[in-house]
Amino acid sequence: MALREQSYLILLALADGPLHGYGVIKVVRDLSEERVRLGAGTLYGALDRLSSDGLVSVVKEEVVAGRHRRYYDLTGHGRTVLAEETSRLTRLAATARHRLSLRPEWGTR
């Protein structure tokens, strides 16, 4: 199952354990070196899709300072999909490195 970059980063953010929405946003920003900045609407839409696909689940809900927080975590299936996608990307990167090394002059044009 190939994942969109945002979905991959959200799953990766949850690899260390449960996070609430703002925590996921911060970790994704850090993982992507500030390149991917999720808005709340984008994040919760993605979390809903990932939940429907059985990759994440809500593990805790609480109210903090009058605001509702939901904590999300990877399911077993989500962890498997994340590992498989990471392997696929690793193989793709290795192939890209190999192909680029075949024509080093290509980058100098």
Image (tube, rainbow, N blue to C red):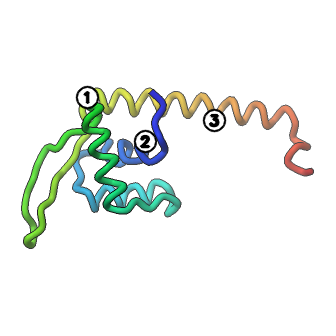
Mark closer to the observer (1, 2): 2
> Which amino acid is tagged 1?
Gly
| SS type, badge 2 | helix
Of the image marks 1 and 2, the number of the one nearer the N terminus: 2
**In front here: 45 or 25?**
45
| SS type, badge 3 | helix
Q: Which residue is mark 1?
A: 76
Q: Residue at x 23, y 42 (%)?
A: 73
Of the image marks 2 and 3, the number of the one nearer the N terminus: 2
Q: Residue at x 91, y 43 (%)?
A: 105
Q: Quadrant of the N terminus?
A: top left
**In front here: 104 or 70?**
70
Relative to residue 64, is residue 27 depicted above or below? Answer: above
Q: Position of residue 63 (x, y in %)?
A: 7, 63
Q: Position of residue 65 (x, y in %)?
A: 9, 72
Of the image marks 1 and 3, the number of the one nearer the N terminus: 1
Q: Could you give the CA–CA distance between mark 1 and mark 2, rounded to whole angstroms?
A: 15 Å
Mark closer to the observer (2, 3): 2
Q: Position of residue 66 (x, y in %)?
A: 7, 71
Q: Is mark 1 in CB contact (under 8 Å) with mark 3? A: no
Left or right: where does residue 32 sit relative to residue 49? right
